[in-house]
Image (tube, rainbow, N blue to C red):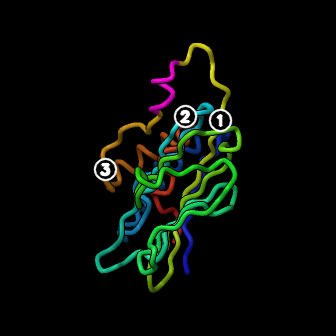
Amino acid sequence: MTTYSSSCHHHPHSTLTATVLLVMSFLIWDSGGQNITRFFVPTTARIGDSVFLICEYSLSRGQKIYTHKWYKEEKEFWRHEPRQRPAYQYFNVSGINVDKFKSNRTHILLKNLSIDSGGHYTCEFSIEGNYDTFISDGRMTVLLPTASTSSSKRRNASPPLLPSSSTPVLAIVSLVTGLFGLCSSLSSVHLFS
């Protein structure tokens, strides 16, 4: 089993790191076909907000997903396992309130956030057969609402719009964007195999 991982952490040398990773991504781009193509966890949200968590992936021809999971602080709260019935499973985790009707294999809608909703989120998917596992993660902080925040703005927290693509250009843009604190997709570029 091979595990691919990425993480969104701020580092004092992020410009240098971004430059090095940008150059490396051109040199060692993995065209294997399976990877996380889009990842999003909002860095901040407010109590009462609803937010989307996004984890889109691509597979090589003939490959099938074994499991796709979401964790908060290493506690699993959502699972998609196509060969099981039910295919979607939800687990009780403090601060997690999944909207089951507006969530699917690519995005999870967390509603009515509380202070307990803040923390470290991880998306993981594995491939049937060889069980290669791909992981991406990010951190969300939940803040108290401010008097100037209107409820209509607070209720519609959503990810930035990105084209749906698995091209190296998107991966590089997402990589650099993620290093500068927007936590886009660090796992789109495979730096090790």
Identify the disc placed on residue 163. Answer: none
- Residues at marks 2 and 1 touching, judged by CB atoms closer than 8 Å: yes
Going from the N terminus, do you reach mark 2 or mark 1 first? 2
Amino acid carrying mark 2 in the image: Asp
Identify the disc placed on residue 164. Answer: 3
Query: Residue 153 colored magenta?
Result: yes
Identify the disc placed on residue 142. Answer: 1
Q: Which residue is mark 2?
A: 49
State the residue lying farthest toward the top. 148
The answer to which of 30 and 148 lies nearer the viewer is 148
| Quadrant position of residue 189 | bottom left
Q: From the viewer's perspective, is 44 left or right of 63? A: right
Q: Secondary structure at mark 2?
A: loop
> Which quarter of the figure is the N terminus placed in?
bottom right
Is residue 38 depicted above or below 149 in this figure? Answer: below
Query: Residue 20 colored magenta?
Result: no
Q: From the viewer's perspective, is 149 left or right of 62? A: right
Is residue 35 depicted above or below 151 in this figure? Answer: below
The image position of residue 75, as x and y in percent, is 68, 62
Amino acid carrying mark 1 in the image: Val
Q: Secondary structure at mark 3?
A: loop
The image position of residue 18, as x and y in percent, is 53, 43
Q: Residue at x 29, y 76 (%)?
A: 61
The image position of residue 68, as x and y in percent, is 49, 67
* Dot 3 alpha-carbon crowd within 10 angstroms: few under 14, some 14 to 19, many 20 or more: few
Going from the N terminus, do you reach mark 3 or mark 1 first? 1
The image position of residue 168, as x and y in percent, is 35, 54
